[in-house]
Image (cartoon, grey):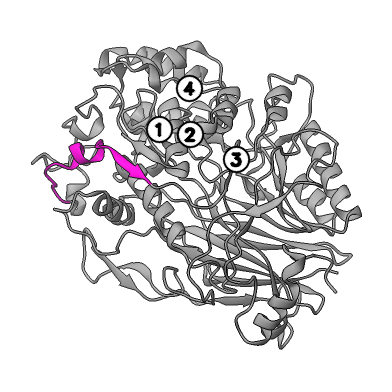
Amino acid sequence: MSRIRSVATAARDRRAFLAATGAVSLSAGIGFALRPGTSEAATDTAATQGQPIAVSRRAPAAPLAPYTRGTTLSTMAAARPGSGFRRLGDGPAWPRVVRGDLAAPKAGRGERRTALAAFVQFTDLHLVDVQHPLRYEYLRAETSSAWRPQESLSVAGAVSLVERVNALRGAPVTGSPLHFVMTTGDNTDNNAKTELDWFLKVMSGGRITPNSGDPVRYEGVQNSDLKLYWQPEAALRDSDKQHGFPRIDGFLAAAIRELRSPGLNLPWYSTVGNHDFLPGGCYAPGDSFFADFAVGGRKLMTLDESVGTGFWKNVKKGGDPKGADFKAMLTSQVRRTRAVTPDEGRAPFTPAEYLRAHLDPANAGAGPVGHGYSAANLAAKTQYYTFRIADGLLGVSVDTTDPGGHYEGSVGTAQLRWLERTLKAADKNKEHVIVFSHHTSKTMRNLREDPAHPGEQRHGGGEILSVLGAHRSVLAWVNGHSHKNNITPHAAPDGRSFWEVSTASHVDFPQLARVIEVVDNHDGTVSLFTTLIESAAPHDTDFTDLSQTGLAALYRELSFNAPGARTDLSGDPEDRNTELVLKKG
């Protein structure tokens, strides 16, 4: 029998009755989630052992039961017939795929299973200060990620995703209450204080004005009269209008208008990504030149393609981790920069400032204060921690950013040893673990030395897989970074196994988040159910509707049509809505 214990021992009999009657899982009216006073952060003490499991929110009106509405099991945004700029509408649902790569699914498990936990994963929100001087939109010809026509609506899209989660009636498969939301990094786009403030308000609630610089006027590439970018309010036939992009009067004023986020009505936790830590997502922090340029009054919007090609090739290879070439290029192009309004709010934030912002009670929202981070993280200068998901189920948030620079990740020896100790303790306590990080196993190949820890070895994805695979406690490694849905089985020869669940971003199409449910099948196996969700915005758009909801819908449609965007990010059916079975004794 599985050694995972339920989130509420007193509710076992009730759950057994519900399972037998088809209304499986946690009883209606009980919303359990961790709200600890502290998290275990870079220490060896078993700080999570005595942490309370508390009511997270008032459960939706009874009955809680399996459902598909509001998920991609019901419908998914899809392009209508046509050419050029494609309008979206309701498309066919994505079916659930049962995967037995690691263990054979046994008959009758649906009647036996007990829900242990359910949570939502956000990843790669990329809330963008689109007017930020350090952005490198001029590399658009080299990479579509340098500038996206939808980026100015990223905050509206994220708020709509929060609204979707708040409207969910528990977990789609079991109908159990949701425990929490975990965001697995790249919450911001350019390590800017403006973006961090917007992210925290999106998640915890508040009024957000997604504007910087001039308080009443947009100053960026979308009113630059440059053909390289979509000029939504101009008659200019720019490169995007040549692909059918529309002219929308009032777009830019609407894009920088104040929005209101209700905040998640669930506790939420935060994991750091390279865009949250490194300027531009790839340059080692600390150079005062970049901080000064970020808050200054000049912005580069165009670059000769011959210069851009060589520059981007070097970045992709990790050839400029400290940004020396980037600095030299900006200096050489100063005559081509344009005047913008300086703004101190665009300054890069340090890891300590990132932690303090999370720990600020004003940003607590539904809790917990710190969103996983604690005073111990501040003292130790770390950004990794553990938290209690449920009785017998531990969450581990890993920091995979490399302070030495470059967008790929790794971990230092101290963190790797901490992870090994944490998993060893979980094995001993007969607990199980879900690991969260930003980078995937395949994107942890950057082994540059951390300037703050000279001589400390860095470790890549292969070593992380070996560590996780050595412990029976591990159920899953949940991450993002790649902007693509991908689910990978990892099996060791001795029968130990776990699933790696990578989820698409919320900036590129398809803009998705993922609900993950952990259930005990009471037959020696555990199932992880994954269900993808979109934002609450309708699939249909109206170019004259510049309301908050209308902008969120347009955000999705623009992302679908973005020239050069990848079309494989949704993954294959077995990477989307799934049941992932694995043996756990």
Tag 1 near tag 3, CB within 8 Å: no
Q: Residue at x 26, y 49 (%)?
A: 548
**Residue matched to label 3:** 371
Q: Which residue is mark 1?
A: 309
Q: Which range of residues does the magenta coloring cover? A: 246-261
Residue drawn where x is 70% and y is 33% of the image: 447
Answer yes or no: is residue 176 visible: yes
Q: Which amino acid is tagged 4? A: Pro
Distance between mark 2 and mark 4 Cα atoms:
25 Å
| Separation of marks 2 and 1 at Cα, in angstroms | 6 Å
Residue 142, visible in the rendered structure: no
N-terminal-most mark, 3 or 2: 2
- Up the image or down, 188 lies above or below 54; here it is above
- Asked whether the residues under the numbered discs 4 and 1 touch, taking CB atoms below 8 Å apart as contact, a structural biologist would say no
The CA span between labels 3 and 2 is 37 Å
Counting from the top left corner in percent of width and height, residue 155 is at 36, 42
Residue 255 included in the magenta stretch of the image: yes
**Residue 227: % across, % down:** 19, 37
Q: Amino acid at mark 1?
A: Thr
Would you name the residue on which mark 2 appears? Answer: 313
Q: Is residue 467 left or right of residue 198?
A: right
